[in-house]
Amino acid sequence: MEQVTSRKDQEQYWASRDQPYSFVSAKEFSEAFQSFHIGRKLGDELAIPFDKSKSHPSALSTEKYGVSKKELLKACISREFLLMKRNSFVYIFKFTQLILLASIAMTVFLRTEMHRNTITDGGIYIGALFFAIIVIMFNGFSELVMTIMKLPVFYKQRDLLFYPPWAYAIPTWILKIPITFVEVAIWTTMTYYAVGFDPNIGRFFKQYLIFVLANQMSSGLFRMMGALGRNVIVANNVGSFALLAVLVMGGFILSRDNVKSWWIWGYWVSPLMYVQNAVSVNEFLGNSWRHIPPSSTESLGVTLLKSRGVFPEARWYWIGVGALIGYTLLFNFLFTLALKYLNPFGKPQAILSKEALAERDANRTGNFIELSTRGKSSSERGKDSKTNSSARAPSLRMPSLGDANQNKRGMVLPFQPLSITFEEIRYSVDMPQEMKAQGIPEDRLELLKGVSGAFRSGVLTALMGVSGAGKTTLMDVLSGRKTGGYIDGRISISGYAKNQQTFARISGYCEQTDIHSPHVTVYESLVYSAWLRLSPDVDSETRTMFIEEVMELVELNPLREALVGLPGVDGLSTEQRKRLTIAVELVANPSIIFMDEPTSGLDARAAAIVMRAVRNTVDTGRTVVCTIHQPSIDIFDAFDELFLLKRGGEEIYVGPVGRHACHLIKYFEEIEGVPKIKDGYNPATWMLEVTSAAQEAVLNDNFTDIFKNSELYRRNKALIEELSAPPPGSKDLYFPTRYSQSFFTQCMACLWKQHWSYWRNPPYNAVRLLSTTVIALMFGTIFWNLGSKRNRKQDIFNSMGSMYAAVLFIGVQNATSVQPVVAIERTVFYRERVAGMYSALPYAFAQVMIEIPYTLVQALIYGVIVYSMIGFEWTAIKFFWYIFFMYFTLLYMTFYGMMNVAITPNHSIASLVSSAFYAIWNLFSGFIIPRTRVPIWWRWYCWACPFSWTLYGLIASQYGDLEDKLEGDETVKDFLRNYFGFRHDFVGICAIVVVGMSVLFAFTFAFSIRTFNFQRR
């Protein structure tokens, strides 16, 4: 039915052979149905209004949801609790991370090193409190990723009226509250008395309460950001921006007295301000800070609070508590609203080819416009029409193999037809612990038990069996894709022992998952594959001709400019992806092609199109093997031979299929007790049914034994023996190099693809540059002209605060947002590397190099805006140092994010691992506690922390040579040396170290990509 209504396939069903064919449109079919007696009867029935009195009372639902609100809430709570149990690794990791950070904080701010004599001593305590707030708030950041990961399922269930958004939102919030209590308890009990905060037990519990509320507030904020962002990259950028705004306006980085009048509203709106005020008041109005220092009329605690712009009244603790409860409720309410009213960004929508669009218009209007074939002469177009008409044969099978050989397609480049034989292949894995626990004594579980066979050129072989029979396992073993397990047996390529490195050059593997770079076009994907996999002696003109021929062979010409996209999100449909996967392997000009379930997930017409492409490939003389799961009659009829496995990895039929499966049916019907196939029944389905384990039990026989005693088995053995001997005058496969292209060409090709991938990825690059611009303008207006003020120590702290916030947040944003991009490309890298396209280093080189120009633009945007608005000294050398340190900081942070993806299995774990280091680097950056006040046993880490080198370079280059007087007749230069330990003559060393950090992280990324393989097969 699908083919009859398709312009491409309709002609084969034309009944009136004496009349010329003319296309019958869907509109004509519709009109014919309406004039047919069934259509007229249906129309008459629908014209009569329905009598509602005749309907059953239960026929229409009166409630929007299936159960009561109470039951809905119980169901959602139960599911959320189950998800939390299943995701316990994240919570255990967060607890472990908190214990580690608390241990570090305890030993850095150890009470024996902490004094209460001066305002400077108090500043260290404020730094300890600020660090605690940052850790508690950042601990909620994982909510953002987890929220986004669950959104696709939520949107589907919301639209199908499973439950209202509030029933989903409330458990997400409420069930996390006990986790918050445990997290904050870990932090407060470990650090409060060890650091030496005020020993009053009441103040201990008040600090605990404010941290619990701060954690709940930040979790609510990140949940809301996730629901508003709906995309990992966008939400990470927006979330980082929100946290930055909250942090800068919190009162620690920039004191209240220095906040500009146009930003004072930001100070009052920032939730962090209420946390900072509450914890500061709770600590510094305690007994430990009541003493009045010399030449002062107020207690040290009150003086300290006033110097930092904190309100010194005790009521500000309870104002903070009220504000945080209000913010928690507000953020969770906005989270619920976002869930209710927002929809996912991009709905899964396949690319519509020009042909399909023209056909759709023709069906609507009745007029069809013939599409011109771009760049082809009239003779070539004539040839196309012949090709298309030949492809319209009712069966997918060509008339005969002999006829096909007369007119082989896809032969611009010659290739060597090769066969593959295998004998007694056994594959086993270590016995799973669950099975050992059930009493199984063996150490290994055997998945393939001595299978043998031969795949020949020009023959399409189906590899079939029930689920768990070992179809994909056998294909992975033969193609050399297995990364673990134990393999025994002999594999030969045209009589010579298989060598995996040379085999990768003459074989192709079409994976079931259709993995491709999402931001390149169909044509570019093929150009890239051909560039890296064809022999270097193929010139570019021949290569282009070959690509064009493959595109025609696999019917991809209408889609040549379409972006590939992400599966299920955008870009190509499943069927179009399958054809692209086949084409990407074909342009390598392989002799042997393996295809893993090429028709899975496709409708009948899409499967027919894919199988037509597969059949065209076989008819070029190549060896093609497909695993296939319950094919239709037509698709099964396209195969020449069948390799049938039963559960446990044993062959039960290896031989020809025959026209309409006649040979296969004859073999099984001759076995005593096997029921005959019914007329019109699918032979593939019948075959799987009659060879099932249940049928074996009924027959009290073993199909493997029956096959091994058959004439067919003996013929196969003879064929394997014949093909295992090298043909006279033949030579073993030999290539002078492992890869077809030189290292330089590999680098250029990888860089070319990365260039297009980055250029066409606005959610990553455009959002990154836009958010950098917004942050720069925000910082410029917040810290307006503060760089020119050098009268008080607080002025230096404020300038350093602007640098600290930029380094921490834009750097962390870069590291976080690059991770999903690299994670997607890494899955493509695994496929391309095992296909022998390139080594790991060219890929790593391209991934590293493509970041350099984008990061430079980002650093220039930020540097120029902020430097001019904050009002730093306009000298060429100082401006250069500012841009230099910002650029290499953003660069090493980007490389750090990439490195974390390379050393972890996925980007979720990468973000968890990297976040632990952000907190530690934040502590040792030199802003929260200067290096001179860090205990001697931790001071070494100040030299190992990348952020501390950046801040050293930025501050020392701007202020390290100034002789301006601060309060107390101390010069800026002396203050930096005495308080921070910064010297102007050390700037050059700082520059070398930040460049070294970039090189170190880039090298570690390259080494990890080359060494670690997290793809398990």
Image (tube, rainbow, N blue to C red):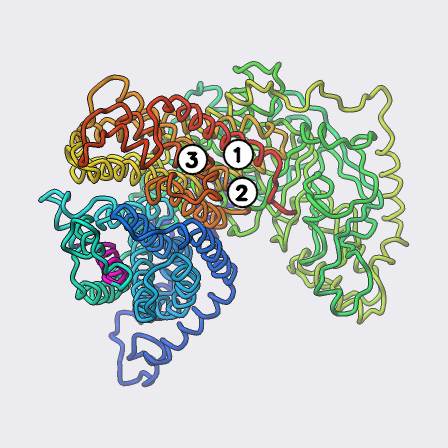
Coordinates of residue 343 in the picture (x, y in percent): 30, 55
Which amino acid does the dot numbered 1 rest on?
Answer: Phe
Coordinates of residue 534 in the picture (x, y in percent): 60, 22
Q: Nearer the viewer, residue 11 or 192?
A: 192
Residue 748 is left or right of residue 170, and the answer is: right
Is residue 624 depicted above or below 695 in this figure? above
Residue at 23% x, 58% y is 291
* Residue that mark 3 sits on: 946
Which amino acid does the dot numbered 3 rest on?
Answer: Pro
Q: Cα distance, mark 2 to mark 3?
A: 40 Å
Residue 537 is left or right of residue 67, and the answer is: right
Coordinates of residue 334 in the picture (x, y in percent): 24, 61
Q: Nearer the viewer, residue 947 or 973?
A: 973
* Label number found at residue 1005: 1
Is residue 494 depicted above or below 13 in this figure? above
User: Which callout, 3 or 1, points to the residue nearer the camera?
Assistant: 3
- Asked if residue 330 is among those painted magenta in the image, a careful observer would answer no
For marks 2 and 3, the one nearer the N-term is: 2
Q: Cα distance, mark 2 to mark 1?
A: 26 Å
* Residue that mark 2 sits on: 514
Q: Does the magenta stretch mainly form a helix, a strand or a loop?
A: helix
User: Which callout, 2 or 3, points to the residue nearer the camera?
Assistant: 3
Which quadrant would residue 433 be assigned to in this image? bottom right
Residue 667 is left or right of residue 545, and the answer is: right
CB under 8 Å between discs 2 and 3 = no
Q: Which residue is situated farthest in the front direction here?
A: 294
